[in-house]
Image (tube, rainbow, N blue to C red):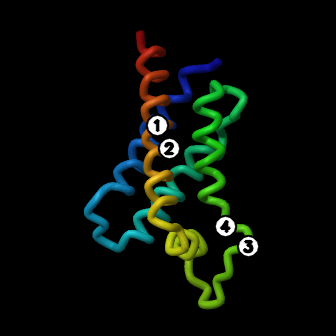
Amino acid sequence: MNLVRFESQAEDLSKARRALMLPHLRGEAESVAEAFRVCSASFHHLNPKDLDDAARGWFTKITEFMDTSGVQDPDRRDKQVVKAEGLSDDQKFELSRVVDELAHWFERRSLEESR
C-alpha cells in the first residue's frame, strides 16, 4: 500500500468534513454539494484497492451518496445541489459520519507514513 499519496486525501476529506459542519452560510444543500465536489476531486486518482476493507466501505458509501445519475434537474441547476436537497436527515447524518471516518483513516495513514 502506497501511503505517501494519502496525505492529499487526508487534507481533502478534512475540507469535506468542514463543509458538512455548521454553520452552513450558503445553505445546507450547498454545503453538502461542496463536500461532494471535494470528495470527487480527492477520489479521482484514488485506487480503492489501496484501501483496507473499512476504508473501502466508507469510500463506496460516499461515492453512492455523490452519484447523480437519475437526478432530474429541469432548471439546469447544479445536480449535486439537487441531489443534496433530496437527502433525508438520516442520509445527511450517515454522509457526515462516513466522511469523518474516512478522513480519520487517511489522517492515520498519513501520520504512519511520516514516521
- Discs 2/4, front: 2
| Front in this rendered view, residue 115 or 18 | 18
Amino acid carrying label 1: it is Glu
Q: Which residue is mark 4?
A: 68
Amino acid carrying label 2: it is Val
Pinpoint residue 81: horizontal percent, then vertical percent: 52, 73
Q: Which residue is mark 2?
A: 98
Amino acid carrying label 3: it is Gly
Q: Is residue 41 above or below residue 5?
A: below
Q: Are marks 1 and 2 in contact (CB under 8 Å)?
A: yes
Residue drawn where x is 34% and y is 51% of the image: 18
Q: Would residue 17 be found to the left or right of residue 41 on screen? A: left
Q: Which residue is at the far top?
A: 115
How packed mark 2 is, by other alpha carbons closer than 10 Å (few <14, some 14-19, many 20 or more), is some
What is the secondary structure assignment of the residue under circle 1?
Answer: helix
Q: Are marks 2 and 3 in contact (CB under 8 Å)?
A: no
How packed mark 4 is, by other alpha carbons closer than 10 Å (few <14, some 14-19, many 20 or more), is some
Q: What distance separates the C-alpha of mark 4 from that of mark 3? A: 6 Å
Q: What distance separates the C-alpha of mark 1 from that of mark 4? A: 23 Å
Q: What distance separates the C-alpha of mark 2 from that of mark 3? A: 23 Å
The first of marks 1 and 4 along the sequence is 4
- Discs 1/4, front: 1
Q: Is residue 95 above or below residue 57?
A: below
